[in-house]
Amino acid sequence: MAIDAHITDPSLASAVETSGAAREQAQTLVDLVAQAIAANANTNGPLPADALIEISKQQKLLNTNLAHLRGLHRTAHFRARETKSQTAEARHEVDVLHLQLQNLYYEQRHLEGEIAACEGFDHTYQLLPLVPVEEFLSQHPEHADADENALMVMRINHERAERETLEQQRLELQKRKQKLIAENKKRRDDLANLDKDLEKFIDAAKPIQKMFEKVV
């Protein structure tokens, strides 16, 4: 297959076509000069006027094709440089997009790893002594249509409320206990003081007792 068949750009195709025409024109001019020289070889004189006119005509056509070819070459050069710049910009955009895609891929793998770690993590809430689902639903039938996650949240909130209630009761009992301990201490102190008073009374009554013993 000819190289020309692979050229699809109109400007390049025109340059190739003009180049071929210039080549053929140059070959025609060379053949024309060679024929004129060969025909005039016996006389060794100047070339005939008609031959010179034809040679000049062909040379002008060749110069025209060469000038056209130079313009097409310049245009093709600018187009090639522009295409190269556009290709570099497109390659840069592709590289940026590829880098972004790689970053998204790594981020996706990271998130998948985090999700797997979260799914496999034994969270503390799994160890809570929650009310069984059946018992919770029997107490709160309005939540029978809730999904698993919502039901778990409600059970945890229920457990929290129960524990807060028990903690409140514990604090109240603690206060009552402290109050009873204080009252018991006060009673022990009162009894101790009463014993001291009683001992003082007995000591004070001993002389009277001895006096009664003497009278008797």
Image (cartoon, rainbow, N blue to C red):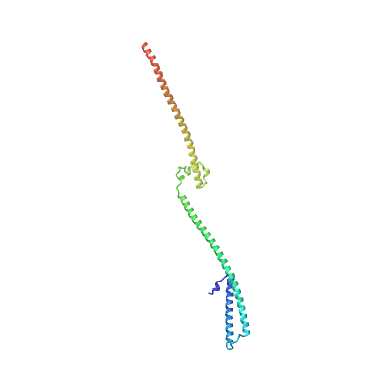
Vertical arrangement, residue 173 with respect to residue 77, above or below: above
Residue 22 visible in the snapshot: yes
Residue 127 is situated, as x and y percent measured from the top left of the image, at 44, 44
Displayed quadrant of residue 70: bottom right
Give the number of marks: 0
Towards the viewer: 76 or 119 = 76
Towards the viewer: 135 or 173 = 173
Vertical arrangement, residue 61 with respect to residue 107, above or below: below
Residue found farthest to the top: 215
Residue 67 is situated, as x and y percent measured from the top left of the image, at 61, 74
Residue 138 located left or right of residue 202: right
Vertical arrangement, residue 36 with respect to residue 79, above or below: below
Residue 216 visible in the snapshot: no
Residue 106 located left or right of residue 62: left
Q: Quadrant of the C terminus?
A: top left
Q: Name the residue: 58% across, 85% down.
A: 37
Residue found farthest to the front: 45
Displayed quadrant of residue 193: top left
Residue 148 located left or right of residue 26: left
Residue 210 is situated, as x and y percent measured from the top left of the image, at 37, 14
